[in-house]
Amino acid sequence: MHDSTDIDQRLTDLEIKAAYTDDLLDQLNQTVFRQQQQIERLARELEALRRQIPEGGAPFQSLRDQLPPHY
């Protein structure tokens, strides 16, 4: 059988693990929250860029396409 000090030590170890788990969960929640904010900001920026594209959606042209033929 386990004596009371062994049980107390096991209980203390479990409490420590639970505290670390709670801290890790808080950190992960904060990370997910920040990432969601960044995703929403990037989505707004993408939408703003899409609004800048002229109607008809002219394809992207490289500056090399605009060089005179003698280059």
Image (spheres, rainbow, N blue to C red):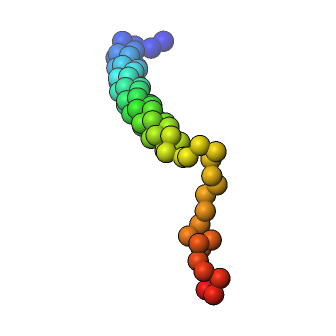
Residue 1 position within the rendered picture, expressed as x and y whole percent measured from the top left: 48, 12
Q: On the rendered image, what quadrant is the C terminus found in?
A: bottom right
Residue 33 position within the rendered picture, expressed as x and y whole percent measured from the top left: 40, 29
Q: Quadrant of residue 21?
A: top left
Would you place residue 39 above or below residue 19 in this image?
below
Q: Quadrant of residue 40?
A: top left
User: Is residue 50 among what the camera can see?
Assistant: yes
User: Is residue 24 among what the camera can see?
Assistant: no
Kindly identify the residue that appears in the image at 44 percent across and 14 percent down. Answer: 2
Kindly identify the residue that appears in the image at 62 percent across and 71 percent down. Answer: 65
Q: How many marks?
A: 0
Q: Which of 63/37 is in front?
A: 63
Would you place residue 54 above or below residue 43 in this image?
below
Q: Quadrant of residue 31?
A: top left
Q: Which of 54/16 is in front?
A: 54
Kindly identify the residue that appears in the image at 55 percent across and 46 percent down. Answer: 54
Would you place residue 55 above or below residue 5 in this image?
below
Kindly identify the residue that appears in the image at 38 percent across and 22 percent down. Answer: 22
32 on left or right of 71 = left
Residue, far bottom: 70
Residue 29 position within the rendered picture, expressed as x and y whole percent measured from the top left: 41, 27
Residue 49 position within the rendered picture, expressed as x and y whole percent measured from the top left: 49, 44
Q: Which of 65/3 is in front?
A: 65
